[in-house]
């Protein structure tokens, strides 16, 4: 609570608002209130509430109009909202005490003051923020005060305001503020609104003397703990692509926490006073203001678009806010990505300012020889290549240390990594200030060698690279990286900005090399020691997305960047060639594994022809894994691990033995031998099974699937239908097998049934036995990307398929009622695309369909293929956020590839119709 705050009656904090009377004309509204006549108090209150509500609505419309004209003035809009609320409350309170509960001669106990607290007390309100107020009385509330408070609250609810309120005596206020840091924080920003000014002054003086005076250390500790807990809850990264503007890391609450701590510990009353206390330089305060103004603008737009209090910047509103704030498209970078990049740059700036602030707290509150809130460290400064070690942190001996030799801007981070120490926040401040000095030293061999040491460090490169980026040194040293700092990708697949994704990928690479992800990635962990060009692999991970946000294929453009940068970093010609190749083809392995049939030998041959060497294959596998893992939580799973391992093993065999398909018959025979042993069957029983199934089946399916299929087929006997569903922990999916009389449309009916039961098909293999039966294997996941493993879930899958094949279920109705797999997928415009390829396989026509993911997409595509009179041999489903890529291996009904141009055009048209949803819309 600020002493001297009753002067706020003169509205000094709102003087910067132009034409305040247009927001609310206090005199005119007061006259209207004075003219109200009603038969009783309740009617009088309702009439006043209606009049004030109308004034509030007109004021909000005026604020919104001004904001539309100047859509970047966030602080102005927030202040205007608080000003309007002040006027409404004061008019209401005057009305209550003069018309509803007049008390011309109040006793000493009947004094009362009303205080704005929290963000409203600070004089900032988003359009639909709660109105937080407190009522204070000198002692226990007398009946008159209770009546006034009750009437005020009822009127505020009638007006339509969402009110957070408290009523306390002065002693209760002090007791609760001491006991609860939330109450302490709310009262810290208390501002006089109405009532007894002397009572407010007494409350403010007691708060300062009895709460604030000796509680700074505890308050700071509690605020920092609260901040950490909030960050963990919100994802502990300021670079999540759907950030919370208020509570997220780098959001408004972080700026507010700085001000609260400054106010409590240093006695500042305005953020500008942080400069006077030496906590910020004038430039840093301008950065504080710029970030605060921008974040407030975004928050106000969010509220106005949603028509309610909304703090999360979701995909569906990012486009709208970019439009409202008048961002424009640029080549390779749409307006929404430019807007979000600026958002993340401000969030990054908030993080930087927080670090500086914490450094001052450390100096003010840390005991001798220890860091604030951290274990004791050595106090005596020592030197490390000219730098000073201050309580275990690298600091500068004097302010011009970087200017004397700008290469030290890189050296400080290399030393921090080498000696496992932190960089002092004040040294970070100096690095951020002087980062531009490295521009003329980018080609200095010392600077590049030091950077390469950090990048390829066996210790903690992720942490130190993030420090370099936060200080702005990394973006200055490598301008191509600077271009992707805070660069988001407007889709639901990538969870982080490009720079954050890249740094996380390097951290994962480091963990794999150290063997700390052996359980998750046994193959890549085992292969890493055999990587000859270790430096090239680290640099390739650093550069793999370096060209995102440019106009063109980022893989091709990135390879050109690699060819230019690698020699500067000190890599050899051979290493440079490897890095450029890895960047150029960093999506090849995942595209092949997830979108192609790995049992088709030509798929393996084509892949191996591009890779050409076992060494490149090892590096590409590891790069692919860290790239996928760094996309975000929940993206990596056991199925992707197995597909990549299968592709690696198959390609490694080709590269080792040559580009001839060797031993196909021997491999099939070996599989059958292993299977027979697992089943415990005699030769005659095994021969009957082998006779039923074509050669392609034995190539396509792994042994564990062959075993389950064999038991199902054997147990089915002459039954026309047998269904098996079992959880498969290794693939992180559920294996669903259907053995049924083969007939046209079987696949799309099964697919529809699985979708209707809540499953997502990620892979499907369709086989026809020599006895005319279909043997179809589906890998199915739940909507969260895991497996169905409960008995009830597995029974539901079996029942849905059985009902569908027996025509007992109305599939179209059940499927049309399914919600979108991603609630905000409608925010993305994805034009369906169909690619028909007769070169990818020697036996099949390969069709790839790109479309927006939606319920039962595979079912609708399979139905379109059924109508096209083609045979599906396998289907492979990959989803990338809101985008689905479904690939089919097809033949015509005679078993040949589809080559007639008229047939291909008709197939393409039908699939485009199904992919776009127009066919099912017409049917509905």
Image (tube, rainbow, N blue to C red):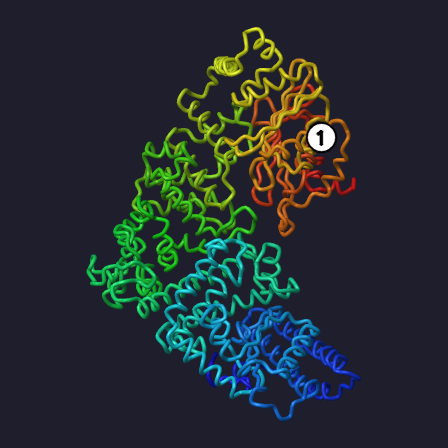
Identity of the residue drawn at 28% across and 49% down? 449
Q: With respect to residue 476, does 781 lie above or below?
A: above
Q: Is residue 561 above or below residue 878?
A: below
**Does 544 sit above or below residue 86?**
above
Q: Quadrant of residue 474?
A: bottom left
Of residues 279 and 106, the one nearer the viewer is 106
The answer to whether residue 188 shows anywhere in this view is yes
Q: Nearer the viewer, residue 268 or 858?
A: 268
Rendered location of residue 561, percent (x, y):
41, 47
In-image side of 520 versus 107 (left or right): left
Residue 721 percent across, percent down from the top left: 70, 21
> Which residue is depicted at the point 43% across and 41% down?
626
Q: Quadrant of residue 120?
A: bottom right
Of all residues, the one furthest to the top in this rendering is 684
How packed mark 1 is, by other alpha carbons closer than 10 Å (few <14, some 14-19, many 20 or more), is many
Is residue 899 left or right of 572 when viewed as pictured? right
Q: Residue 200: x and y, percent?
A: 51, 84
Per the image, the residue denoted by label 1 is 749
Position in image of residue 641 (x %, y %): 48, 34
Of residues 902 and 261, the one drawn nearer to the viewer in this rendering: 261
Q: Secondary structure at mark 1?
A: helix
- Residue found at x 55% / y 20%: 706
Residue, x 34% and y 52% (percent of image)? 464
Q: Which quarter of the rendering shows the C terminus? A: top right
Task: Answer above or below: position of 866 versus 315.
Answer: above
Q: Is residue 908 visible?
A: no
* Residue lying at the far bottom of the rendered structure: 105
Question: What is the number of callouts on the image?
Answer: 1
């Amino acid at each position: 609570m600020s002493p001297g705050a009753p002067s706020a009656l003169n509205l000094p904090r709102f003087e910067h608002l132009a034409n305040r009377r247009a927001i609310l004309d206090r005199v005119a509204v007061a006259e209207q209130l004075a003219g109200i006549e009603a038969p009783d108090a309740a009617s009088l209150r309702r009439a006043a509430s209606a009049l004030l509500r109308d004034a509030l609505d007109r004021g909000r419309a005026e604020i919104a109009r001004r904001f539309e004209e100047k859509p970047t003035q966030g602080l102005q809009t927030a202040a205007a909202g608080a000003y309007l609320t002040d006027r409404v409350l004061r008019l209401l309170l005057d009305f209550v005490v003069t018309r509803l509960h007049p008390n011309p001669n109040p006793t000493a106990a009947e004094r009362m003051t009303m205080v704005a607290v929290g963000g409203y007390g600070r004089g900032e309100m988003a359009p639909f923020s709660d109105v937080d107020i407190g009522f204070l009385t000198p002692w226990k509330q007398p009946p008159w005060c209770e009546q006034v408070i009750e009437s005020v609250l009822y009127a505020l609810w009638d007006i339509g305001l969402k009110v957070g309120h408290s009523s306390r005596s002065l002693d209760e206020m002090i007791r609760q503020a001491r006991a609860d840091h939330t109450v302490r924080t709310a009262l810290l920003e208390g501002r006089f609104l109405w009532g007894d000014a002397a009572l407010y002054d007494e409350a403010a003086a007691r708060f300062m003397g009895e709460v604030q005076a000796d509680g700074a250390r505890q308050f700071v500790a509690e605020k920092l703990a609260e901040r950490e807990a909030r960050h963990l809850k919100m994802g502990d990264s300021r670079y999540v692509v759907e950030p919370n503007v208020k509570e997220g890391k780098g959001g408004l609450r972080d700026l507010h926490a700085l001000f609260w701590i400054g106010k409590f510990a240093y006695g500042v009353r305005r953020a500008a006073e942080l400069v006077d206390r030496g906590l910020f330089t004038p430039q840093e305060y301008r950065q504080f203001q710029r970030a605060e103004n921008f974040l407030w603008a975004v928050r106000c737009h969010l509220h106005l678009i949603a028509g309610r209090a909304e703090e999360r910047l979701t995909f569906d509103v990012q486009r709208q806010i970019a439009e409202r704030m008048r961002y424009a498209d640029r080549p390779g970078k749409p307006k929404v990505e430019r807007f979000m990049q600026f958002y993340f740059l401000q969030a990054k700036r908030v993080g930087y300012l927080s670090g500086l602030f914490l450094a001052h707290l450390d100096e003010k509150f840390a005991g001798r020889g220890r860091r604030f809130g951290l274990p004791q460290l050595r106090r005596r400064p020592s030197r490390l290549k000219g730098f000073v070690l201050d309580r275990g942190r690298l600091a500068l001996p004097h302010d011009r240390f970087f200017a004397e030799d700008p290469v030290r801007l890189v050296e400080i981070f290399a030393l921090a990594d080498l000696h496992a120490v932190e960089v002092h926040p004040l040294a970070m401040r100096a690095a951020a200030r002087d980062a531009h000095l490295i521009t003329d030293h980018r080609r200095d061999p010392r600077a590049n060698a030091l950077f390469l040491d950090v990048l390829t460090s066996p210790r903690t490169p992720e942490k130190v690279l993030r420090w370099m980026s936060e200080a702005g040194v990394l973006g200055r040293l490598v301008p191509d990286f600077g271009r992707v700092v805070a660069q988001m990708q407007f889709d639901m697949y990538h969870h982080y900005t490009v720079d954050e994704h890249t740094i996380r990928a390097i951290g994962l690479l480091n963990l794999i090399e150290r063997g700390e992800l052996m359980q998750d990635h046994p193959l890549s962990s085992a292969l890493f020691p055999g990587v000859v060009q270790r430096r090239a692999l680290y640099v390739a991970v650093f550069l793999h997305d370096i060209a995102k946000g440019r106009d063109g294929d980022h893989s091709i453009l990135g390879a050109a960047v690699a060819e230019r940068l690698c020699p500067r970093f000190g890599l050899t010609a051979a290493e440079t060639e490897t890095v450029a190749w890895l960047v150029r083809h960093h999506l090849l392995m995942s595209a092949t594994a997830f979108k192609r049939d790995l049992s088709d030998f030509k798929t393996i041959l084509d892949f191996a022809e591009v890779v050409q060497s076992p060494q490149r294959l090892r590096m590409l596998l590891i790069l692919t894994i860290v790239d996928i893992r760094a996309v975000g939580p929940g993206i990596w799973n056991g199925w992707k691990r197995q597909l990549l391992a299968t592709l690696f093993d198959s390609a490694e065999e080709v590269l080792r033995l040559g580009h001839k398909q060797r031993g196909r018959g021997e491999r099939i025979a070996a599989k059958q031998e292993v299977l027979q042993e697992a089943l415990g069957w005699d030769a005659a029983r095994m021969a009957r099974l082998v006779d039923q199934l074509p050669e392609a089946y034995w190539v396509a399916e792994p042994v564990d699937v062959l075993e389950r299929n064999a038991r199902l087929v054997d147990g089915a006997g002459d039954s026309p239908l047998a269904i098996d569903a079992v959880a498969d922990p290794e693939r992180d999916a559920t294996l669903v097998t259907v053995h049924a009389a083969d007939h046209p449309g079987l696949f799309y009916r099964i697919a529809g049934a699985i979708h209707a039961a809540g499953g997502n098909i990620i892979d499907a293999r369709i086989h026809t036995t020599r006895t005319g039966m279909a043997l179809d294997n589906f890998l199915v996941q739940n909507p969260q990307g895991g497996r169905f493993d409960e008995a009830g879930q597995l029974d539901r899958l079996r029942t849905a398929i059985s009902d569908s094949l027996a025509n007992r279920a109305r599939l179209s109705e059940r499927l049309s009622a399914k919600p979108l797999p991603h609630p905000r997928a409608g925010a993305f415009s994805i034009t369906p695309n169909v690619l028909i390829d007769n070169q990818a396989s020697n036996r099949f026509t390969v069709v790839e369909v790109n479309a927006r993911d939606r319920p039962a997409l595979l079912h609708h595509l399979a139905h379109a293929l059924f109508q096209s009179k083609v045979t599906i041999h396998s289907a492979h489903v990959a989803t990338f956020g809101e985008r689905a890529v479904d690939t089919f291996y097809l033949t015509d009904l005679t078993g040949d590839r589809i080559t007639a141009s008229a047939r291909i055009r008709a197939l393409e048209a039908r699939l485009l119709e199904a992919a776009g949803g127009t066919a099912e819309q017409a049917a509905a």
